[in-house]
Amino acid sequence: MTLSILAVDDSRTMRDMIRLALEPAGFTVTTADDGIHGVEVLNGIAPDAIITDINMPRMDGFGFIDAVRGQVKHRATPILVLTTEAAPELKARARNAGATGWIVKPFDPAKLIKALQMVAG
């Protein structure tokens, strides 16, 4: 089963690392470089899960999660936050906005794959 993932991160290196971690495991990865771009890309695809950073220009991860959850067709799409942030209040804020899970960078590719398979499989 091929899972389709949208990865939103302002770091090209991080987008590449996510792609390199997921594509060999059979995932299809689409990327966006910030929240606004993520919303634009999302209009043309129906991913099985979304990965988003929190700290991004133009629209941060919280704004992006709100925008995704505001679209009926993506209301139930799992969203994993992948960020350097680890503060409990930020995790709570992301959960309240509609995030499904939280992974702290640097990430373990095997754990990311397992998490995506759990939420999207």
Image (tube, rainbow, N blue to C red):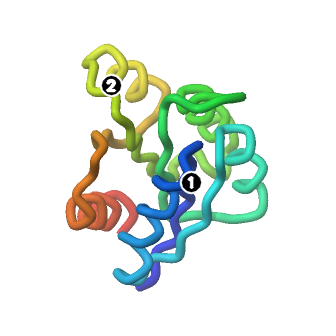
Residue bearing mark 1: 12
> Looking at numbered disc 2 in the image, what kind of residue is underneath it?
Lys
* Residue 92 occupies quadrant: top left
Horizontal side, residue 27 vs residue 8: left or right: left
- Residue 91: image tag: 2
In the displayed structure, 45 sits above or below 94; it is below
- Most foreground residue, 106 or 111: 106
* Residue 102 occupies quadrant: top left
**Residue drawn at (61%, 50%), measured in percent from left and top?**
74
Q: Secondary structure at mark 2?
A: helix
> Looking at numbered disc 1 in the image, what kind of residue is underneath it?
Arg
Q: Residue 54: x, y in percent?
A: 48, 31
In the displayed structure, 86 sits above or below 71; it is above
- Quarter holding the C terminus? bottom left
**Residue drawn at (51%, 49%), measured in percent from left and top?**
76
Q: Residues within 10 Å of mark 1 (few under 14, many from 20)?
A: few
Q: Residue 3: x, y in percent?
A: 46, 74
Q: Residue 14: x, y in percent?
A: 46, 53
Q: Give the farthest residue toward the top.
A: 89
Give the mark toward the camera: 2 or 1: 1
In three-dimensional space, the C-alpha distance between marks 2 and 1, rounded to whole angstroms, equals: 24 Å
- Residue 3: image tag: none
**Residue drawn at (39%, 63%), measured in percent from left and top?**
120
* Mark toward the start of the polypeptide (2 vs 1): 1
- Quarter holding the N terminus? bottom left
